[in-house]
Image (spheres, rainbow, N blue to C red):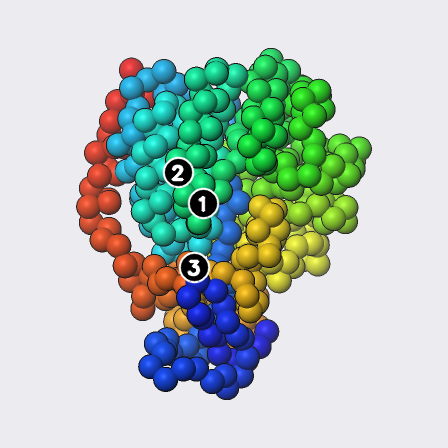
């Protein structure tokens, strides 16, 4: 931690970090005295559209929740307007909480839905990774190629990954997804061993068969794994998205974070959309710490607060392969950062600021948020108008609920 320091931005990048730095005459100055400057939070796994189903099936485990809140929407007339409204709400909520990079695993129920989702991500000003949920349908695969060509490749804040569900039964879709990921030169992004029932579905066997266990693969959840399976993931260079609040709500289990850390597996933190219901990364960090301590009845168990803060920033960037660009306040990196005000009732007085960020921090402490050098939150207020966003989300949520009730 560097105290009484300056952070100088030049365009989209961090130019310098240090004490008493000189700046050009006329430079805009944000007074950060008494405040904390952090690299922006990286949400390694979410489903942005699922803001529309907040509070759905809160007494269900994973498969019950999916059956009530997601699966009925496949083949249903869910629209691009629905996707746009949900993702727009999620992105603004995330920005307000200090999240500057979002990894949006989209179910992409149809092409219109996908483009509505992408429009919201683009308008947000966030850095984003769009994970397009794929299958073996040639029309879907061609649509993904078009999305990369016409949307992702033209947006400097955007990246693409291919989403899939690896099971023996779903192998043809997984194989097609892995083949497309290799063709486009992008990572595959999967849900792995999230629930106790998942190991019996042959997920790792399917990944091995498809040749998908390779560097860059992002495995979301990765809870129910043996020592040998963890060794295999580490050797393959697989990265993991830990979603502690979602895992708690769905009673999915507790990830083996200390064992992953010992094996050098890159781990970041995720929100996981509608099974979390909040974009509060401070809450995610302290839950990541607390779950491990409670499970082991050991207050020294990994992760420590500083480890959780790293997972929420540089750890997520490393998992996405973006650590050269984001994740730390390093000259030359992109100017993705936030300014936290600790002089508030929930945070003061000063003790150990790193521990307080994790255990006391709240989105209300986030006063400024910059992405690529552009302020998306100023003095505690988003630069976007939220009133219409909330109204549109309510209309879309009502429509989605009608589809779920059919």
Q: Residue beneath label 2, please?
A: 151
Residue 241 circle label: none
Q: What secondary structure is marked by label 2?
A: loop
Q: Nearer the viewer, residue 337 or 347?
A: 337
In three-dimensional space, the C-alpha distance between marks 2 and 1, rounded to whole angstroms, equals 8 Å
* Quadrant of the rendered image containing residue 50: top left
Which of marks 1 and 2 precedes in the sequence?
A: 2
Where 243 falls versus 373 (above or below)?
above
**Mark 1 — residue?**
158
Q: Quadrant of the rendered structure where residue 165 is?
A: top right
Q: Earlier in the sequence, mark 1 or mark 3?
A: 1
Crowding at dot 3, Cα within 10 Å, few <14 / some 14-19 / many 20+, comes out as: many
Q: Which residue is painted at 44% across and 79% down in the image? A: 34
Are dots 2 and 1 in contact, CB under 8 Å?
yes
2 or 3: tag closer to the N-terminus:
2
Disc 3 target residue:
372
| Residue drawn at the location 54% of the way across and 57% of the way down | 326
């Amino acid at each position: 931690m560097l105290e009484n320091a300056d952070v100088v931005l030049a365009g989209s990048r961090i130019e310098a970090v240090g004490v008493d730095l000189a700046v050009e005459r006329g430079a805009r100055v944000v007074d950060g005295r008494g405040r904390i400057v952090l690299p922006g939070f990286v949400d390694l796994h979410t489903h942005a559209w699922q803001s529309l189903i907040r509070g759905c099936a809160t007494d269900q485990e994973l498969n019950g929740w999916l059956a009530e809140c997601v699966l009925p929407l496949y083949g249903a007339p869910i629209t691009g307007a629905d996707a746009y409204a949900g993702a727009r709400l999620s992105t603004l909520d995330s920005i307000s909480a200090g999240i500057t990079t979002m990894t949006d695993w989209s179910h992409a129920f149809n092409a219109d839905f996908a483009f509505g989702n992408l429009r919201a991500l683009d308008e947000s000003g966030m850095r984003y990774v769009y994970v397009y949920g794929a299958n073996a349908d040639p029309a879907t695969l061609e649509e993904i190629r078009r999305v990369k060509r016409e949307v992702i490749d033209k947006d400097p804040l955007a990246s693409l990954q291919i989403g899939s569900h690896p099971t023996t039964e779903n192998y043809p879709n997984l194989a097609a997804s892995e083949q497309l990921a290799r063709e486009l030169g992008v990572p595959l992004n999967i849900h792995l061993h999230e629930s106790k029932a998942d190991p019996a579905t042959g997920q790792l066997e399917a990944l091995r068969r498809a040749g998908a266990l390779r560097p860059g693969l992002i495995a979301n959840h990765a809870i129910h794994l043996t020592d040998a399976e963890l060794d295999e993931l580490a050797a393959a260079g697989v990265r993991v998205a830990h979603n502690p609040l979602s895992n708690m709500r769905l009673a999915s289990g507790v990830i083996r974070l200390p064992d992953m850390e010992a094996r050098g597996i890159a781990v970041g933190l995720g929100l996981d959309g509608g099974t979390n219901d909040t974009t509060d990364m401070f809450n995610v960090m302290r839950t990541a710490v607390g779950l491990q301590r409670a499970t082991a009845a050991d207050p020294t168990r990994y992760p420590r607060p500083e480890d959780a803060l790293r997972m929420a920033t540089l750890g997520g960037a490393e998992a996405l392969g973006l650590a050269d660009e984001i994740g730390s306040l390093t000259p030359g990196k992109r100017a993705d950062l936030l300014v936290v005000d600790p002089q508030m009732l929930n945070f003061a007085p000063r003790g150990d600021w790193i521990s307080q960020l994790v255990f006391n921090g709240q989105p209300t402490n986030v006063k400024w948020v910059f992405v690529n050098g552009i302020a998306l939150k100023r003095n505690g207020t988003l630069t976007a108008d939220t009133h219409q966003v909330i109204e549109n989300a309510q209309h879309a949520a009502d429509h989605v609920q009608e589809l779920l009730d059919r």
